């Protein structure tokens, strides 16, 4: 199975190498801002000409938004715009132009309805101070040295790694991997090299291929499994909040940069900003490590994993829980499960957003009309079942796998009460897995794996 996989390694750069990488990142920013200014000027000119009543065929020709068109215009203007262009690799300018071409396409597709999701705004100019330095190399000498502790990149030369790249080197030596691109990026004060690799992965099978597990994510517990296992939420951001506040107050007392007066940041401000950035980077690393361990364990152990399609944007409207929701990383859990289940020979089922997993009794199938958020135990008035709210939701998610497998195969004996209570109380509905609205879509997530969606709504 061929797939696209990323390998990320920390770098140990010398001061000269760091200046060279920053020069390449600055070149990418210059090319991006120049091309964006040209595009905006062309758009404004054509809009003004339309107000004069000029037909479209007589308007000023627009600058192509594709990477090839932007690169052609840049190559013609770079001797005047950036006379220092021979000092850096051409891939630096290509990085900025490629990012702008993608941003313009996303904006245009969002306006015409071709792009789903939230509306995408028009691209903005990149600031030297706020933009994360990054440069991407797609051609030239990109390789790992035989000692596996150094990498070679175009114009930057031989860069030392903070950790061994033996995992990637072994795949390359076995001819089961091919490096497609390399990106050097600064996260906080640390530099990392990320390699986009085409990998030939061996076919794998989960430890328990027929096992089905429902995963209900939350704040009190990061994940509650239908097997009864509880995964604690470490709350890394809350744990570091006191330290962040102290460093933030210390930073506010220093003399920082001011764009209005042109004042530069003091050395003390830079050191304070570095200390605060390290704390943020540590929180991100701890969260990433925990999520990877959780999703890897689920994908390797179980053949079928069922999760919910959560409306995280709507959940963030709750100001009391917004910070804890973002700290948990619900979307990242689903994203990682999407490709890890494919790698391990399993499958991922995504329950419909409106499926009442928390309101449905896992014992008899009765559905409550209302269930307050503070009610942490589910009490069924139809069968008397008392169970933890999150565990009940996980059990219902696991039961959806049977509905997906039997959908369209005829009537299946449902379980649950067939009587109905008053409208103000519970609504007990009999679940018929064979007649539920369960379909399999062909959406392809990153890494090329297919997510099976179970559109199960309460009737």
Image: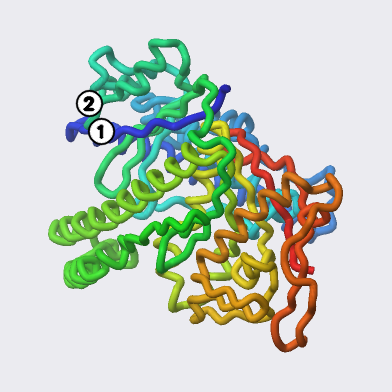
Observer-nearest of 260 and 301: 301
Specify whether residue 339 is in view: no
Observer-nearest of 79 and 254: 254
Residue 359 picture location, percent across and down: 63, 72
Residue denoted by label 1: 11
Q: Quadrant of residue 190?
A: top left
Q: Quadrant of residue 425?
A: bottom right
What quarter of the picture does the N terminus occupy?
top right
Q: Residue at x 46, y 77 (%)?
A: 319
Q: Are marks 1 and 2 in contact (CB under 8 Å)?
A: yes
Q: Which mark is residue 160?
A: 2
What quarter of the picture does the C terminus occupy?
bottom right
- Left or right: 46, with 152 as reference point: right
In terms of secondary structure, where does tag 1 sit?
Answer: strand
| Whether residue 422 is situated above or below residue 338 in the rendered picture | below
Q: Residue at x 69, y 53 (%)?
A: 116
Q: Which mark is residue 328?
A: none
Q: Residue at x 46, y 29 (%)?
A: 196
Crowding near the residue tagged with mark 1, few <14, some 14–19, many ≥20 C-alpha atoms within 10 Å: many
Residue 69 picture location, percent across and down: 63, 32
| Whether residue 142 is situated above or below residue 446 in the rendered picture | above
Crowding near the residue tagged with mark 2, few <14, some 14–19, many ≥20 C-alpha atoms within 10 Å: some
Specify whether residue 279 is in view: yes
Observer-nearest of 257 and 307: 307
Q: Spot the residue most to the left.
A: 268
In terms of secondary structure, where does tag 2 sit?
Answer: strand
């Amino acid at each position: 199975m061929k797939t696209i996989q990323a390998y990320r390694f920390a770098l140990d750069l010398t001061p000269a190498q760091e200046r060279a990488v920053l020069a390449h990142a600055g070149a990418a920013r210059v090319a991006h801002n120049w091309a964006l200014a040209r595009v905006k000027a062309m758009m404004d000119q054509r809009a003004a000409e339309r107000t004069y009543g000029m037909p479209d065929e007589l308007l000023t020709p627009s600058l192509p938004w594709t990477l090839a068109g932007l690169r052609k215009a840049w190559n013609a203007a770079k001797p005047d715009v950036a006379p220092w262009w021979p000092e850096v690799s051409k891939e630096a300018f290509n990085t900025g132009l490629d990012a702008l071409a993608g941003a313009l396409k996303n904006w245009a597709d969002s306006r015409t309805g071709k792009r789903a999701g939230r509306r995408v705004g028009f691209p903005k100019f990149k600031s030297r101070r706020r933009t994360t330095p990054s440069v991407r190399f797609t051609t030239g000498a990109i390789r790992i040295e035989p000692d596996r502790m150094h990498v070679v990149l175009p114009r930057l030369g031989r860069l030392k790694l903070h950790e061994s790249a033996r995992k990637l080197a072994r795949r390359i030596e076995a001819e089961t991997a091919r490096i497609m691109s390399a990106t050097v990026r600064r996260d906080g004060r640390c530099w990392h090299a990320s390699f986009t690799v085409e990998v030939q992965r061996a076919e794998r099978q989960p430890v328990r291929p027929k096992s089905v597990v429902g995963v209900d994510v939350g704040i009190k517990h990061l994940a509650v499994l239908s097997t009864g296992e509880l995964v604690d939420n470490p709350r890394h951001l809350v744990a570091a909040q006191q330290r962040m506040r102290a460093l933030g107050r210390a930073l506010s007392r220093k003399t920082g940069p001011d764009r209005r007066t042109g004042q530069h940041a003091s050395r003390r401000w830079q050191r304070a900003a570095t200390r605060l950035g390290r704390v943020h980077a540590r929180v991100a690393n701890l969260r990433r490590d925990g999520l990877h361990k959780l999703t890897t364990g689920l994908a390797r152990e179980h053949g079928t994993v069922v999760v919910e399609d959560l409306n995280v944007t709507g959940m963030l409207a709750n100001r009391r829980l917004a910070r804890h929701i973002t700290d948990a990383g619900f979307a990242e859990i689903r994203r990682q499960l999407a490709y890890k289940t494919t790698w391990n020979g399993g499958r991922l089922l995504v329950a419909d957003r409106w499926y009442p997993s928390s309101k449905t009794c896992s014992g008899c199938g009765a559905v409550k009309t209302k269930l307050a958020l503070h009610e942490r135990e589910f009490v069924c008035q139809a069968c008397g079942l008392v169970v933890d709210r999150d565990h009940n939701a996980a059990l219902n998610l696991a039961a959806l796998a049977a509905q997906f497998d039997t959908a369209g195969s005829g009537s299946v004996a449902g379980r649950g009460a067939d009587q109905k209570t008053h409208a103000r109380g519970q609504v007990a509905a009999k679940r018929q897995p064979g007649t539920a609205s369960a379909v399999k879509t062909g959406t392809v997530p990153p890494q090329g794996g297919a997510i099976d969606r179970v559109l199960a709504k309460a009737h």
